[in-house]
Image: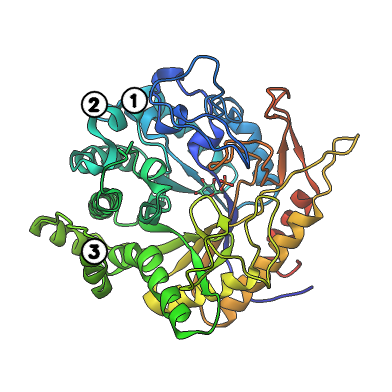
Amino acid sequence: MEHNCLPNHFLWGGATAANQIEGAWLLDGKGPSIMDHITGGNHTKPREITPDLLLGAFYPNHDAIDFYHRYKEDIRLMAEMGFKAFRMSIAWSRIFPKGDEAEPNQAGLEFYDRVFGELHRYGMEPLVTLSHYELPMYLCKEYGGWKNRKLIDFFEHYAITVFQRYKDKVKYWLTFNEINCLTTNFGAYFGGGMLLEPGENQEQTRYQALHHQLVASAKAVKDGHEINPGFKIGCMICYMAAYPLTCSPEDVLLAQQYDQIHNCLAGDVHVYGEYPAFAARYFDEHGIRLEVTREDEAILRKGTVDYYTCSYYSSNCVTASPEKASEIKGNIMGGVKNPYLKASEWGWQIDAKGLRWVLNHVYGRYRIPIMVVENGLGAVDAPEKDGSVRDQYRIDYFRRHIEQMCEAVRDGVDLKGYTTWGPIDLVSASTGEMAKRYGFIYVNKQDDGTGDYSRSRKDSFYWYQRVIESNGQVL
Ligand code: BGP
């Protein structure tokens, strides 16, 4: 099928996170991050957070897919697909092993010099997330994570350190991955690095942590622009698309409120520099009292983002009807099943048209450039005897989503780029499995500990190569 819709210089690529690919969790001075303290799980067995490491337990992020030693081969394969951009994160604990040090770890800084050098060799733009679910564990244990205001200063120090170091190597930055996950229970540990007590008012703590991150993000935006006015610094929202289950006004209103709180609240602060009008009532009705200083308000206004990015995987439904309990458990979003949609093997509903809806909705609200920085299908791949992987299901998923992305561009959305999630198989965030594979590149590492970590091209590899080559015209 032929399309002709995407702008020239469209940033095609893939997205990863340090903790899900690098491994080398204690090498060359790196300290443990929160993801090094969470065990492997699977679809039915949740991952376990262990503040003290358990002897004999399996921690899949400790060696992940060993990108730390294999980045040259991995980047070469991505270049072969024609990537224009590679989204990655810097592991904070590789730069500041504990998080509160004054001086950075030189070996950590040098590692990313090498990675950026390799990306530039192939003409690829690094798109760098400062914090992707990988807070130094020390800040979690000793300071209580993001509920503690002190983390704003530690983060700012980290951000300035890497901005200065890489000011001529990186142009596109994102502050916090899926910052709005703190509006859900999932976000407490993954997003906020917080071990919450059962008796605690969890919502209060999460929204205060979110506020601290929003302030830290705004400070980083302001500092970054001072260090290099050419920097483009964006936000990253997990787009939790929720449809009303029925056309009853109660369901429609609930879907709007869900969207306001889970998606727009953080997005509005990032883009407009202040809390939206609906926040006050929500906080009031949920017993949330935010500590917001005058200085916070001023910094939020000064540190608004240059562009908006989001992840998009699926959509759910919400209903006001008390008989319908939540049926879906995604990693962040939950909800009620949509009878019109099929789901992945992990129960994530597949909804390509929802991406068009989200892009129009976001662009209509903010009118600033947008990138989709995560989208993909986690699936079981079964390699053939000759090692090839016939992943037509993945190709179908991407084809449908890219078609809808093109429709959104025709609708007038200013879309600058698209980086698929996990272009190379990596450790799943929610389950810790390798079996939930997203990649165009297969990594021979299995959950039972077998595999030699070798890389190979799946069918989708050659397909995505043609998509990029034709700038989305050949799908
Ligand atoms: C997003 C995270 C990623 C990634 C992705 C897929 O929420 O930003 O880190 O993991 O979801 O989720 P999972 O790995 O749980 O399948």
- Left or right: where does residue 209 sit relative to residue 299? right
Contact flag, marks 1 and 2 (Cβ < 8 Å): yes
Give the quadrant of residue 152. Answer: top left
The picture places residue 364, in percent across and down from the top left corner, at 43, 80
Mark sitting on residue 202: none
In the rendered structure, the answer to whether residue 249 lies left or right of residue 23 reads left
Q: Is residue 189 visible?
A: yes
Alpha-carbon neighbours of circle 1 within 10 Å: few (<14), some, or many (≥20)? many
Is 94 above or below relative to 89?
above
Residue 7 showing in the rendered view: no
Give how far across and how far down residue 426 sits, in percent.
61, 38
Q: In the displayed structure, does residue 298 sit left or right of residue 467?
A: left
Per the model, the C-alpha gap separating discs 1 and 3 is 35 Å
* Residue on which the image places disc 1: 97
Mark 2 lies on a secondary structure that is loop
How many dots with numbers?
A: 3
Q: Is residue 464 above or below residue 44?
A: below
Crowdedness near tag 2: few (<14), some (14–19) or many (≥20) residues, C-alpha within 10 Å:
few
Judging depth in this view, the residue of 386 and 255 nearest the camera is: 255
